[in-house]
Image (cartoon, helix red, strand yellow):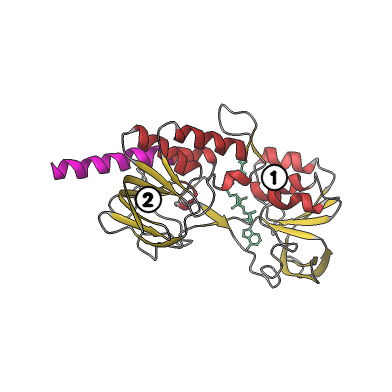
Amino acid sequence: MQVKDFDIVILGGGPAGFSAAIYASRGAATTAIVDVNMLGGQPSNYLELENYPGFGKIGGFDMMEKFEEHADMFGVEKFPMQEIESIDLISNPKIIKTKEFEFRAKSIIVATGAKPMKLNVPGELEYVGRGVSYCAVCDGAFYKDKIVAVVGGGNSAVEEAMYLTKFASKVYLIHRRDELRADKIVQERAFKNDKLEFVYDSVVTEITGEDLVNCAIIKNVKTANVSELKIDGIFPYIGILPNVDYFNGQVAQDQKGFIITDETMKTSIEGVYAIGDVRNTPLRQVITAASDGAVGAVYAVRYVETLEEVRV
Ligand code: NAP
């Protein structure tokens, strides 16, 4: 196994991770990004963003390419598609073992982001890839002239439902309340879309089908009425959970598992910072992830400098 030593290793190559990488490397720290997937994080799957200042409208994938090119300018080393075996945040140096490498870092910045929450209903996992999808941008084109449902009432559900109307003949938006959570501007656009039908006060209790999904069983939470919705595909967009699989309770987390930080992004462990969607934060946007990255990296660099002062 090849040993790689860095001042700062950033776990996760999404907007938070790239922003941290830019700040850390410009702060003269040797910096690496390690990711279990391709680089780019969640926005790589967003159709487009229109709220990142200075960019107007930009595709999610294009934006993340720009983040990566920017990090490349400062010589950040990148290790995508790493199969992680263990992470020791407490030792000094901190150690991340993957199948190929042992990364040793004076400081670790956790930027592992979040993953879609599951509905946890019968049929959901069974039909993943056969009618159940968590990525409209990836799979929407398979549903040309078909009927699909999106579950959720937040920005993701409403935006992705609108995206799916480009392909599908009809899109049901199933929401558990009678008022959407999505931003008002997003709601207004959705209400004008003729292909969207809102199914309020309803939850999905089961997904059924044969080879492929053909039905969602839904229950009206006010009347307790149960009905069958004939669909060809279903896209749950009901929120996110943090990617914290390898930490085994080493770091303090909130009830849902999001990592708790202070305003400098410092976690409960000296030299470990958490940024972006994986941390306990009131707003999860590309801009807030990038902002977290800047703050976390500046304080991680300061931490590394204090270690060097101690050694002199
Ligand atoms: P979210 O804002 O947390 O919305 C989750 C939605 O799913 C809510 O409407 C919630 O209902 C519903 N829900 C939660 N658990 C459920 C369950 N078990 N069964 C049925 N419905 C359930 O999540 P999100 O839409 O994924 O967005 C996450 C963050 O990313 C947000 O901060 C959002 O603003 C941001 N985002 C921003 C953009 C953008 O600005 N372009 C795009 C996408 C996401 P209730 O409303 O009843 O709680």
Foreground of the two, 74 or 305: 74
Residue 279 x, y percent position in the rendering: 44, 51
Name the residue type under label 1.
Answer: Glu
Query: SS of the residue at dot 1?
Result: helix
Q: Residue at x 41, y 35 (%)?
A: 22
Q: Of the residues shown, which amino acid type is indicated by label 2?
A: Thr
Residue occupying the far front of the picture = 1
User: Which residue extends farthest top?
Assistant: 54
Q: What whole-number distance in Å separates the C-alpha atoms at marks 2 and 1?
A: 30 Å
Q: Position of residue 85 (x, y in %)?
A: 42, 63
Per the image, label 2 sits on a secondary structure element best described as loop
Compared with 288, 115 (above or below) is below
Q: Where, quadrant-wise, is the C terminus in this rendering?
A: top left
User: As displayed, is residue 1 above or below residue 11?
Assistant: below
Ligand 1 closer than 8 Å to the CB at disc 1?
A: yes
Instruction: Let me know if residue 304 is in the magenta part.
Output: yes
- Quarter location, residue 61: top right
Say if residue 179 shows up in the picture: no
Q: Main secondary structure of the magenta part?
A: helix
Q: Which residue is mark 1?
A: 159
**Residue 164 visible in the current orientation:** yes
Closest to the observer, 64 or 30: 30
Boundaries of the magenta span? 293-312
User: Which residue is disc 2 drawn over?
Assistant: 261
Percent coordinates x, y for residue 206 in the rendering: 73, 70
**Front one among 35 and 224:** 35
In which quadrant will I find the N terminus? bottom left
Q: Looking at the rendered structure, which numbered label has been put on residue 297?
A: none
Q: Residues within 10 Å of mark 2 (few under 14, many from 20)?
A: many
Q: Position of residue 287 (x, y in %)?
A: 51, 37
Q: Would you say 310 lies left or right of 102 here? A: left
